[in-house]
Image (cartoon, rainbow, N blue to C red):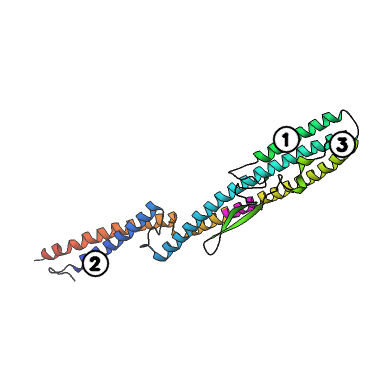
Amino acid sequence: MISFQNNSGAMVALQALGGVSSQLDTVQTSISTGKEVDTAQDNAALWAISELMDSDVSGLRSVSDSLSLGEATVAVASAGAEQIADTLTEMRSLAVMAASGMGDLSKFEAALSLRTEQINSIISSSNFNGVNLLKTDVDGNGGTALAVPSALSAAGGLTTLSVDGVDFEGSPQFNIGNRTVITDSASALTALGEIEGFLTYAISSSAALGASASGIAEQNQFVGKLSDTITRGVSLMIDTSTEEAAAKLLALQAQQQLSSVSLSIVHTMPDTLRNLY
């Protein structure tokens, strides 16, 4: 129906154009921000979930950093223990030659003393970030183990991995400072037996530290995968699907053009009516 008083067709076309323009603005914002849910106003439930998940991801990244630091600390100690084992292997060879009576015993003793000093130097220098797992006092505060944050607990706290120190300073199994001094074949055999015990302790300690470093590395890989999985999940919830958004943008632009044409047509209807009179 055409009326001079009210152009109902124009109102309908104008409403349609306004609706299309609003949808077009939403799609363009979604494309420009890369997020379909950018604020709580877009979708309160999904926005709240995504914020919580983003917080968890941030926490997991901090845990990963702590695990990397812990892995490096244990790796330094493990390398020190391995070097101690290598030095003790050399000492064992020297003790074997001394026990066989080959050469000047005083020279063998001097070589053993030199390697003992090397071992003490290795123990002192196997320090990383203020922690030395080869000493009696691991952290300078009387600690005997290293606690490494490993995961976020369900209650919002942290779970930890504990790495025990291997005491090369005060363990009765590694009393290298009181090794028997070689003066003859008998004392050389005694020293050889002691060095064998020290070597056994060093090898087992190195293996324990290596296993701990490996466990921390594996936990760090798991934390990284968990963080990536959560990030992908959040992305699926709130990020814009560019393919769908592009297709919708083209469709809305076409609808906007058609609505503009429709509005132009209905605006000419009153003029058509006046031309009849």
Mark 3, residues whose alpha carbon is within 10 Å: few (<14), some, or many (≥20)?
some
Q: Which residues are magenta?
A: 214-223
User: Can you see residue 266?
Assistant: yes
Identity, as a three-letter code, of the amino acid under mark 3: Val
Horizontal and vertical percent position of residue 126: 65, 41
Q: Quadrant of residue 36?
A: bottom left
* Left or right, 124 with reference to 248: right
Give the label on residue 12, or none.
Answer: 2
What's under tag 2, amino acid-wise?
Val
- Quadrant where the C terminus sits is bottom left
215 within the magenta span: yes
Q: Which mark is residue 81?
A: none
User: Can you tell which of label 3 and label 1 is closer to the viewer?
Assistant: 1
How far is mark 3 from mark 1, CA to CA? Answer: 20 Å
Disc 1: which residue: 117
Magenta segment main secondary structure:
helix
Q: Which residue is mark 3?
A: 96
Q: Percent position (x, y) of residue 54?
A: 47, 57
